[in-house]
Image: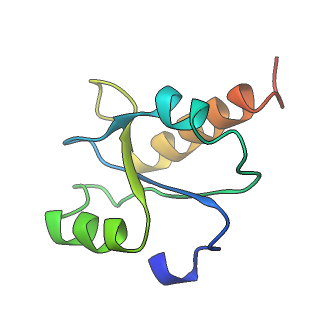
């Protein structure tokens, strides 16, 4: 899947163990008009999967200290992205 992400997109992968602050990444990537993100399965993404994604240009980000279920973390991230990009609010 990481290889199918459009080259021109901002590539994000949610990882609860470590990652950049989402707001900082978005502020530094205002020129990107497309965002491609990956949310892992219940149980999390492995270190090997993160390393592979990073080699393909993905930036690992986290949503804070709380661990969300995979089905809610994607909705949470999408809501944040819509708000930060001006689609909501």
* Residue 50: quadrant of the picture: bottom left
Judging depth in this view, the residue of 71 and 45 nearest the camera is 45
In percent of the image, x 59 and y 30: which residue is there?
27
| Whole-percent x, y for residue 51 in the image | 23, 68
> Looking at the picture, does residue 18 appear above or below residue 83?
below
| Total numbered labels | 0
In percent of the image, x 15 and y 63: which residue is there?
47
| Whole-percent x, y for residue 46 in the image | 18, 64
Residue 1: tell me if it is visible: no
Identify the residue at the far top of this view: 89
In percent of the image, x 22 and y 41: which residue is there?
18
* Residue 55: quadrant of the picture: bottom left
Q: Which image quadrant: the C terminus?
A: top right
Identify the residue at the far left of this view: 47
Q: Decide if residue 78 is on the left or right side of residue 33.
A: left
> Looking at the picture, does residue 58 appear above or below residue 24?
below
| Whole-percent x, y for residue 85 in the image | 75, 33
Judging depth in this view, the residue of 27 and 87 nearest the camera is 27
* Snapshot colouring: rainbow
Residue 28: tell me if it is visible: yes
In percent of the image, x 69 and y 27: which residue is there?
84
| Whole-percent x, y for residue 28 in the image | 56, 36
Judging depth in this view, the residue of 40 and 10 nearest the camera is 10
């Amino acid at each position: 899947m990481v290889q199918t992400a459009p080259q021109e997109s901002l590539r994000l992968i949610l990882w609860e163990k470590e990652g950049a602050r989402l707001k900082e990444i978005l502020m530094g990537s205002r020129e990107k008009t497309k965002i491609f993100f990956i949310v892992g399965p219940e149980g999390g993404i492995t270190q090997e999967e993160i390393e592979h994604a990073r080699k393909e240009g993905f930036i690992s980000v986290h949503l804070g200290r709380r661990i969300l279920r995979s089905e809610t973390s994607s909705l949470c991230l999408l809501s944040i992205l819509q708000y930060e990009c001006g689609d909501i609010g």
